[in-house]
Image (spheres, rainbow, N blue to C red):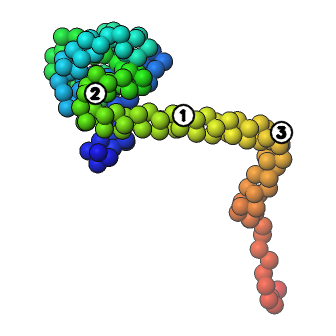
Amino acid sequence: MREAFPVELIQHKIFMVRGHKVMLSPHLAKLYGVEVRALIQAVKRNKDRFPNDFMFHLNDAEFKNLKSQIVTSSWGGVRRANPYAFTEQGVAMLSSVLKSKRAVRVNIQIIRAFVLLRKMVVTHKELALKLAELERKVSKHEGDIRMIFEAIKQLMAPPLDLPKRKIGFHAN
């Protein structure tokens, strides 16, 4: 399964919409190996499992914005309706309505991708905090650092052109 659906491939199908990390119905359908309409029908038959914080329908502006951000031909041809967006919880719920071994295996990889993204966000926050702390420390010693750079520049500067003294004996 890892070879067929690597986490890295799935990560590129996770987008931020309405402040949530989501995957779109066409991408999910492709991963699950079903048609989009079959996926949506399964969801609609089990609507009580998909509250608004698990799944929502993209409006025209959101869909247009996503299409402009992602330069890809995987959006398909003419579409009658905008895709649905599934949050991590909605994706987890999909495996219970799409009752196949493939759905379970795909869900495991998708959940791993969401977890990996969460870890990356935490790492970025930690790095941002460390950078801010370093900037504060540097600003305290800004004058000293400037003096060091000036001294280095002076050492690197070419020597001044002084008149050369002649060496040896010269007859006047």
Q: Quadrant of the C terminus?
A: bottom right
Residues at marks 3 and 2 touching, judged by CB atoms closer than 8 Å: no
Q: Give the tally of numbered discs.
A: 3
Q: Image point 27% across, 32% down: which residue? A: 103
Residue 62 shows in the view? no
Left or right for 60, reference 127: left
Question: Is the residue marked by circle 3 packed among few (<14), some (14-19), or many (20+) residues within 10 Å?
Answer: few
Residue 41, picture quadrant:
top left
Residue 128, picture quadrant:
top right
Left or right for 117, reference 171: left
Question: Is the residue marked by circle 1 packed among few (<14), some (14-19), or many (20+) residues within 10 Å?
Answer: few
Q: Image point 69% across, 40% down: which residue? A: 130
Does dot 2 land on a helix, a strand or a loop?
helix
Q: Image point 36% across, 23% down: which residue? A: 93
Question: In the image, which is nearer the foreground, mark 3 or mark 2?
Answer: 2
Q: Amino acid at mark 2?
A: Leu
Mark 3, residue position = 140
Mark 1, residue position = 121
Question: Camera-side residue: 39 or 57?
Answer: 39
Q: Amino acid at mark 1?
A: Val
Kindly report the distance in space between the C-alpha atoms of the residues bearing marks 2 and 1: 23 Å
Mark 2, residue position = 28
